[in-house]
Amino acid sequence: MQPIQDRDADGLPTPRRYFAAGALLAAIVLAVLDGAIANVALPTISSVLAVSPADSIWVVTGYQVALVMALLPCAALGESLGYRRVFVGGVVLFTAASALCAFSPSLPWLVAARFLQGLGGAAVMSLIAALLRFTYPHQMLGIAIGWNALAVALSSAAGPTLGAAILSVASWPWLFAVNIPVGAVVLLASHALPETPGSGRRLDLFSVALNAGVFGPLVVGVDLLTENAAIALGLIAVAAVSLIALIRREAPREAPLIPIDLLRSGPFRISVIASVCCFTAQMASYVALPFYLQHGLGQNAFMTGLYMTPWPLTVALAAPISARLANRVSTAWLCAAGGVCLSVGLALAAAWPLHRGLPPLVVFTVLCGLGFGFFQTPNNRNMLLSAPRERAGAAGGMQGTARLVGQTTGAIIMELLFTVTRSEGAPRIGLAIGAALALAGGLVSTLRIGR
């Protein structure tokens, strides 16, 4: 057996590694739970603050816009100043913004506080993958990513239930106040995180502004697409122009803000494309299934949530298993099998005659969760290991960006389907499109075989 000091040579020694891993897992749970809990609270917030339901959605949109705008800049800042320093700053900002959310007297204050929360969440999410790479030895990295996926899946599954439980005994500000003690614990445990030296590269503020000009108008434009097409298309055009300008500015650089250098690598580029495909399929399905269950099968909101829970729970079970398999089996084959399994589950759900009953749909969602769990962990592992250690921050930022781009695209697909087709048929079509995209993600992953 290899001596312990040799096994830990490229990671942290135990027990420090366990405290560092605990800080990272608690931070990702904090960020994921907050998003899920806020969604549940929208009707309550709308009523208490006396605003329209449409306006209350900005509580979610403000967070998402900040998150997607700041992921890549936070990754670049982490590479410049050191991952731990920027991560801790993100936790501090997220926790302080949670307090501001809890004390917000009006919707504009709450949206502004949620925007700050999103900036803090971006620093956390973009750097977790990089910090995991410096926390665990190389041979244990897949397992670490699997535990991270497990934490995300369980948080996603528990979020709505936890939010409803808090609202049943307390007012909506407590949904955000509960973040404060958890944030304090994460800050305490973060002393165990690895200290990685920064490169000292100066962050180009004009490129950061262009990056904001890409993702901010894109998210808002997509959100307005079915309400005000002219403004939406104008914002999307601004995003396209900003993207072209950003690529031209950053392409010649050694470590560009948008990791063009990493995207030139075949395995990394393939993993990003496959990730966008499968996250698009997942989000389209997450939007379609509630309508499918409630409108098509007459289920109430509680039963709908119950029938959807097997998906994230199966992801949680599959992620650690796929992480262990990734040390023995080609990650390309694992991702391909996961994508195909997800595709089959969604195709069966789309084709199943509604009058034949619900139990088979539960089996189909379990199949979807199994496929997504077997795809996500090996794909994230490959994305992270395809990048040099000094560009681990950029790889983590791109990982988060691919996920958010996919989730946003999935939501757009369903929004457009509900606009242009009958509401009864839109969920079934959405599930079928999700099946096609998942299959595409699996097939794309096979291009990494032999690389």
Image (tube, rainbow, N blue to C red):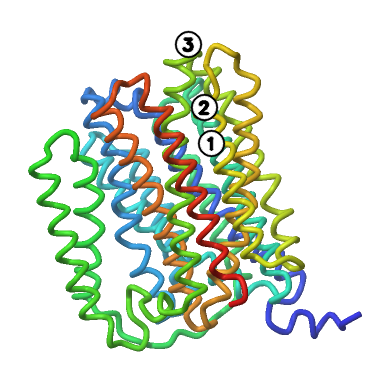
The local crowd at label 3, few if under 14, some if 14 to 19, many if 20 or more residues have their Cα within 10 Å, is few
Q: Which mark is residue 351?
A: 2
Q: Position of residue 110 (x, y in %)?
A: 28, 40
User: Where residue 210 sits: x, y (%)?
Assistant: 20, 69
Residue in the image at 49% along x and 72% along y: 268
Which mark identifies residue 298?
A: 3
Image location of residue 333, percent across then percent down: 65, 61
Q: Quadrant of residue 323?
A: bottom right
In depth, the one of 125 and 402 nearer the eye is 402
Proximity of marks 1 and 3: CB atoms separated by less than 8 Å: no
Which type of secondary structure does the marked residue at label 1 adopt? helix
Q: CA gap, disc 2 to disc 1?
A: 9 Å
Residue highlighted by disc 1:
346
Amino acid at circle 1: Leu
Q: 414 or 64: nearer the eye? A: 414
Position of 217 with respect to 27 (left or right) is left
241 to 259, vertically: above or below: above
User: Could you tell me if residue 315 is visible in this image?
Assistant: yes
Residue 320 in the image: state x and y as whole percent.
71, 54
- Let me know if residue 175 appears in the view: no
